[in-house]
Amino acid sequence: MSRLRAFIKSLIAEFVYHRRAEIVQGCHGILILMYHEVAPSKDARFRLFPVLCTTPETFRQQMEWLQRHFEVISMDEAEKRLRDGSAKDSRAVVVTSDDGWAGFYQHAVSSGGRATVYVATCVLGGQLPWYVRWRILLKEHPYLLKPLAHELGEFEPFPNADTAISRLKLLDIARIEQLWKSIAKESNFQSERLPEGWFMSREQVRQAVEQGVTIGAHTVNHPQLTHELPDIALEEVKESKRILESLTAQPVMHFAYPNGDHNDKVVQLVKEAGYSTAVTTLPGWNLPGEDPYRLKRVDVHEAACVDHRGRFSEARFALWITGEWARVKSRLRVLG
C-alpha cells in the first residue's frame, strides 16, 4: 500500500507541476530553506536521522534546479531586501543548515558556497549535540527506553527513540545532561565510542567564512530556549555569538532558534544579544514587513523531494518548497 501511495503522490505531483507553471513563476518574496545534513543513504547519519538528511546527489540536483528558477542569495542580502522593501519584487532563495553538520558544509561549498550554517558551538570542541547522542544511545540500547521513561515520571516505556527525544526536548539542558550521565552509565556506554567528524571543526568554520559561507549562531548546547531560565537562555544566545565571532573575526548577525522554539521573551533576548535576524521553523515565504526575528523557513529532507523510485523529483521539490504540496494534500485525503 505504501508503494502504491508513493506512486500516486508522484503522479499527482507531476500533473500539478506541469499543468500549473505559475506555481513557480508566480512566486515572489524570499524563501529560506532549512537543511541539516547531506550524507549518502547508506551512511550511519542517514540511517539514524532520515528526516534530517539529504543525499549528495539529490542536494546537487536541488541546487541546480534552484539556480535555474530562482536567485540564490545570502542571508545578509535577504535581510537587506526585507528591510528596504525590495523583497516584494524578488524571487529569491536562501539556503541554510542547522547545527553545523560537516557534510552539509562540504557539499554547500562545492555547490557555490552561498549558504548560511547555523552552528551550535558545542560541536566545535568535538561534542555531539545532545539529541544526536541520545538517538545513538537509544538505538543501540533500546531497553533504556524503560528506565528513561520512569525517570521522567512515565509508567510505560517510550515506544521509540523519537518519542523519548520529543519528551526530552521539554526539559532544560542541565536536566537533559543529568539524565544522560545516569542513563548512559546504566548501559556502561562509553562516550569514546561516539562518532567523530560528523560536525564542523573550528578550522572548518574559519574555512567556511573564507569560502563565502555565512556563519550564524544556534546557541551553545541546542536547548529549547523557552524551557530555560532567562539567564541561562541569554547565556546560550550570547555565548554562541561570542565564540563564533572570536573564531571567525567576523560579526555574527544571524540566529536560528533550536527546534524553532521561541516566544516573545526569547525573541527579546536575541535582540538584546545583538543579532539582526532570527529564523523559525514555521513554513512560508518572507515579504517586507515580516518580523526579522521570526522569519519563516521551509524544512527540506530527502523523503519530501523524491519520487516513488527514490529519484529526485523536480515536481515534488517545487510543490514542497512553494507550499503547494500542503494545499494539494488538504484536498486529497488519499495522500495521507
Image (cartoon, rainbow, N blue to C red):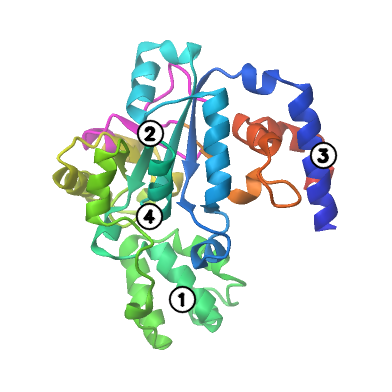
Q: Nearer the viewer, residue 112 or 49?
A: 112
Q: Name the residue under label 2.
A: 114
Residue 153: x, y in percent?
Answer: 49, 73
Residue 149 in view (yes/no): no
Q: Nearer the viewer, mark 3 or mark 1?
A: 3
- For the residues labelled 3 and 1, the Cα–Cα distance comes to 39 Å
- For the residue marked with disc 2, what is the amino acid? Arg
Q: Please state the extent of the stretch shown in magenta in the rendering.
A: 270-295
Q: Name the residue under label 4.
A: 102
Tell me if residue 190 comes above or below residue 320 in the rendering: below
The numbered dot on residue 137 is 1
Q: Residue drawn 40% across and 36% down?
A: 112
Q: Is residue 106 left or right of residue 304?
A: left
Residue 126 image label: none
The residue positioned 43% from the left and 22% from the top of the image is 290
| 222 falls in the magenta region | no
- Splitting the image into 4 quarters, where does residue 159 fall? bottom right
**Relative side of 63 to 131, left or right:** right
Q: Distance between the Cα atoms at labels 4 and 3? A: 35 Å
Q: How many labels does the image show?
A: 4
Looking at the image, tell me whether mark 1 or mark 2 is earlier in sequence order. 2
Considering only order in the chain, which callout, 4 or 2, is on the residue closer to the N terminus?
4
Say which residue label 3 marks.
Answer: 11
Mark positioned earlier in the residue sequence (3 or 1)? 3
Residue type at mark 1?
A: Leu
Q: Is 292 included in the stretch rendered in magenta?
A: yes
Q: Position of residue 63 (x, y in %)?
A: 52, 36
Residue 12, visible in the rendered structure: yes
